[in-house]
């Protein structure tokens, strides 16, 4: 059995058997209490960026690669409830004929992200290899409470913290994938935002403080959540699976720019484009409403409802229909 | 300027400028006190293993690769003074046509190392790529005190915790590098130990407890140290540089198996073979003597002496001579 045939989901399922039960269920790993202070547990997360899979010279300059590597990791920290960043380690593989200027650019991008979001370069390693690759491990501290994929419940609203599909549109523009007529019809503002979203995604560490501000008085901390790095639909499916629920999405309220929505591929990119690095949260309705008021760009995209049976836990439906959303939750890195 | 021309030392020097001063001076990074408990700071370390650079199917089976990846990281934790292991994250890159059995073997080896030395699989990431690669980040807890490369002083003895050159001999045997006459003259016991040293190196986490047991009463904790993953001579040079001293090595007391010493390349492999993963320590003489008595296989290999001038800090000499050791401290991973 080759990795290609196994598929990414099955591979991850098999690898999870090597860790304590539940250890790999979230965006990042929350360490045992004695690794941090009792009130602020530490969180650790490792992400890979491989040239040709996650980035290429055709669409990103080296500082973008460094920024994006840091941002993807910090997004996982945010999605686990981190309110602050300790720092990160960097494993860098590059062929011997790589210019120093490329490495310098990558580190400049990483450093800018750390200056922007806090944290230090803690250490790392470098080696030659046939393909450029970055392995980043980030450490952060839980803020007011942890965010877990499995902490949603039936009745929760699903909310997301910003627009989706922009990063995929940016990639399409950079690769000149769109027919010229479509590309030229887009406003310069949207084009710029899309390319920026692809090259310089912003980890939503600010959401953790907004969650704390909007927490209804007297209610316990319970936040289901993940980031949308694998796509909005995949994020909703993760939350549904974690909660043993069905996720029903409101087709009329997707977090999509109207211009993008007018493109034939707009809705698909919103749901499955990936790499938007927003947070998708499952919150009791009062908390969700308060968060939407507190956080510009945040909106309800659906709700968790009781699964009809065990087999349908984790499934995605359009609200008010029985039509499952097909083919929008899979992205393979193999 | 390409990485090949820059050289590994200069590359690491330039990358260190991105971290706070001193942050990258040790084998692993000691985190700020508020990341652990005040008495047991946390330590983090990232290591890369790239196929064709650090391992190959010709010399290691997948479980060896996993074991070695964990062991190299845990060795860096030991060299920073960790008495216990929290766990590690794994970033795995492999081509899509990689058999699942290879990945399973790697994780079996990683798991066996964690069961042997403590700690859990905390998390990770996987991706396709053209070349197999592992990026491991390990977290540990400082025991009785930190070990730092820069904590040696003139007058300290240099001690090492075990034999050197075995891993390089094992590699030579596996690659059939040695002339048949030389290889056949080696005893079966040495051949087996050499191959085991190459495939299943043992991180010396036990040394931390031995240091505590042998600490002279009333003396403060001060342990200069590093591991010998880059070679024994390189380790001694690191300690000399960190202390602003010269390292003088006793040629008559090298930690080398007599059979290996009889080979023409024996002394060179002892000094520069690398990957022996023992600890090399700078200790005041009374502590060094007590450690040597407490820890079988531990021996004095030299001493730190005052550098004649700033330019000679970090240099290596044979004891009683003015002959610098040339060409035995450089190994390039590019």
Image (tube, coloured by chain):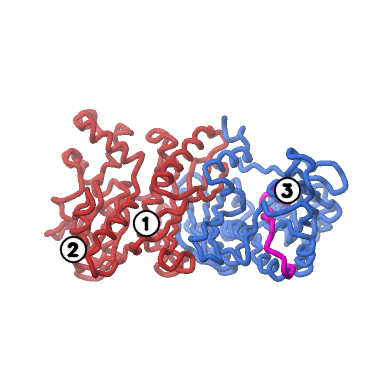
Chain colours: A red, B blue
Disc 1 crowd, CA 10 A, few/some/many (<14, 14-19, 20+): many
What's the distance in space between the residues labelled 2 and 1, CA to CA?
A: 23 Å
Q: Is residue A206 left or right of residue A137?
A: left
Q: Is residue A99 left or right of residue B329?
A: left
Q: Is residue B331 left or right of residue B52?
A: right
Label 3: which residue?
A: B240
Label 2: which residue?
A: A285
Residue A132 percent coordinates (x, y): 49, 41
Q: Identify the residue at the far right of this view.
A: B320
The residue lying toward the viewer, choosing from B316 and A97, is B316
Q: Which residues are magenta?
A: B216-238
Looking at the picture, does residue A328 appear above or below residue B114?
A: above
The residue lying toward the viewer, choosing from A36 and B48, is A36
Residue B85 sits in quarter: bottom right
Residue B13 sits in quarter: top right
Q: Which of disc 1 and disc 2 is earlier in sequence?
A: 1
The residue lying toward the viewer, choosing from A67 and A142, is A142
Q: Residue at x 86, y 54 (%)?
A: B252
In front: label 2 or label 1: 1
Q: Secondary structure at mark 2?
A: helix
Tell me if residue B238 can be seen.
Answer: yes
Looking at the picture, does residue B109 appear above or below residue A119?
A: below
Q: Secondary structure at mark 3?
A: helix
Q: Which chain is disc 3 placed on?
A: B
Disc 3 crowd, CA 10 A, few/some/many (<14, 14-19, 20+): many
Please say whether residue B174 is one of the residues in the magenta stretch: no
Q: Residue at x 79, y 49 (%)?
A: B305
Q: Residue at x 76, y 58 (%)?
A: B159
Q: Is residue A6 left or right of residue B192?
A: left
Label 1: which residue?
A: A83
């Amino acid at each position: 059995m080759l990795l290609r045939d196994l598929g990414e989901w099955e591979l991850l399922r098999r690898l999870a058997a090597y860790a304590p039960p539940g250890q790999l269920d979230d965006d990042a790993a929350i360490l045992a209490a004695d690794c941090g202070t009792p009130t602020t547990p530490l969180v650790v997360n490792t992400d890979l960026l491989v040239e040709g899979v996650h980035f290429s010279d055709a669409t990103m300059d080296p500082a973008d690669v460094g920024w994006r590597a840091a941002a993807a990791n910090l997004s996982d920290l945010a999605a686990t409830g981190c309110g602050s960043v300790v720092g990160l380690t960097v494993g860098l593989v590059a062929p011997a004929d790589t210019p120093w200027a490329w490495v310098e650019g990558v580190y400049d991008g990483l450093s800018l992200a750390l200056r922007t979001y806090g944290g230090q370069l803690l250490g790392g390693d470098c080696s030659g290899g046939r393909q450029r690759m970055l392995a980043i491990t980030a450490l952060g501290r839980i803020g007011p409470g942890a965010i877990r994929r499995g902490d949603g419940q039936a009745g929760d609203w699903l909310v997301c913290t910003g627009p989706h599909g922009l990063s995929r549109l940016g990639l399409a523009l950079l690769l000149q994938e769109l027919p010229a007529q479509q590309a030229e019809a887009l406003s310069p503002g949207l084009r710029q935002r899309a390319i920026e979203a692809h090259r310089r995604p912003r980890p939503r560490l600010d959401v953790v403080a907004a969650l704390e501000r909007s927490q209804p008085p007297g209610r316990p901390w319970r936040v289901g959540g993940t980031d949308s790095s694998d796509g909005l639909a995949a994020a909703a499916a993760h939350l549904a699976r974690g909660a043993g629920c069905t996720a029903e999405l409101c087709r009329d309220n997707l977090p999509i720019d109207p211009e993008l929505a007018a493109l034939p591929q707009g809705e698909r990119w919103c749901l499955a484009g990936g790499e938007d690095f927003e947070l998708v949260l499952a919150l009791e309705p009062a908390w969700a409403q308060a968060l939407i008021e507190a956080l510009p760009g945040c909106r309800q995209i659906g709700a968790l409802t009781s699964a009809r049976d065990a087999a349908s836990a984790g499934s995605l439906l359009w609200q008010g229909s029985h039509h499952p959303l097909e083919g929008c939750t899979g992205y393979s890195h193999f």
